[in-house]
Image (cartoon, rainbow, N blue to C red):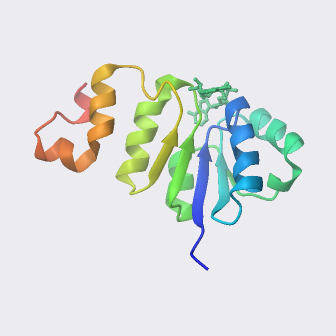
């Protein structure tokens, strides 16, 4: 059997809780939810109320720590959209696949750079993201 995709969730509010449920139920043969990140314990508690099966999963208040420790293949990002750009880029820089929803980012140059990814950004001499 093919290896399952190891997925972590960045942001576990209303949108993510539906997605965690669908991944755990519908995609369970291909994808494993292995960790959850949210800065709010109340959001995680609401998700666990809705989805008792997710209760034993490791949780992190810092998404970078989750990425570092959990050997993920992919993340889904479901935080307020002003945070997406930084979180998408940090995840891609860590070699992860990223799923996020609309709005993907908050400004057009961010979209271009996110779309290009790190290697193209460097080869095309696009400014580093901290200079935007
Ligand atoms: N709710 C929907 O039906 C829906 C549909 C499509 C797209 N979206 C998009 O999904 C995203 C999230 O929306 P939502 O409705 O779930 O909002 P929400 O407020 O219910 O959830 C956002 C979660 O992100 C957490 N968060 C905030 N800062 C964080 C950080 N630095 N690190 C980790 N977690 C952090 C919050 O504590 C909260 O639990 C938005 O971009 C929204 O546009 C939502």
Ligand 1 quadrant assignment: top right
Residue at the (59%, 35%) spot, across then down: 78
Give residue 42's quadrant in the image.
Answer: top right
Q: What is the x, y in percent for residue 132? A: 25, 24
Which residue, as the protein is rendered here, is positioned at the far bottom?
1
Residue drawn at the location 15% of the way across and 35% of the way down: 126
Position of 82 compared to 47: left or right?
left
Q: How many marks?
A: 0
Up the image or down, 48 lies above or below 6; here it is: above
Residue 125: image location, x then y, percent: 10, 39
Q: Is residue 25 left or right of residue 131?
A: right
Quadrant location of the N terminus? bottom right
Taking 106 as reference, is 121 above or below it?
A: below
Q: Which residue is at 77% across, 54% downward?
A: 25
Choose between 30 and 11: the one closer to the eye: 30
**Corner quadrant of residue 107:** top left
Residue name at image x 31 percent, y 21 percent: 108
Horizontal and vertical percent for residue 82? 48, 23
| 60 relative to 11, above or below | below
């Amino acid at each position: 059997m093919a290896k399952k995709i190891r997925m972590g969730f960045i942001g576990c509010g209303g949108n993510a809780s539906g997605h965690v449920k669908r991944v755990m139920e519908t995609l369970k043969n291909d994808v494993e939810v292995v960790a959850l990140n949210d800065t709010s314990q109340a959001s995680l508690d609401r998700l666990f109320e809705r989805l008792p099966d997710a209760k034993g999963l490791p949780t992190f208040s810092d998404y970078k720590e989750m990425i570092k420790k959990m050997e993920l293949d992919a993340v889904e990002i479901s935080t307020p959209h002003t945070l997406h750009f930084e979180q998408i880029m940090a995840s891609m820089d860590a070699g992860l696949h990223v799923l996020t929803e609309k709005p993907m980012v908050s400004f057009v140059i961010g979209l271009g750079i996110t779309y290009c990814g790190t290697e193209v950004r460097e080869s095309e001499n696009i400014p580093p993201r901290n200079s935007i």
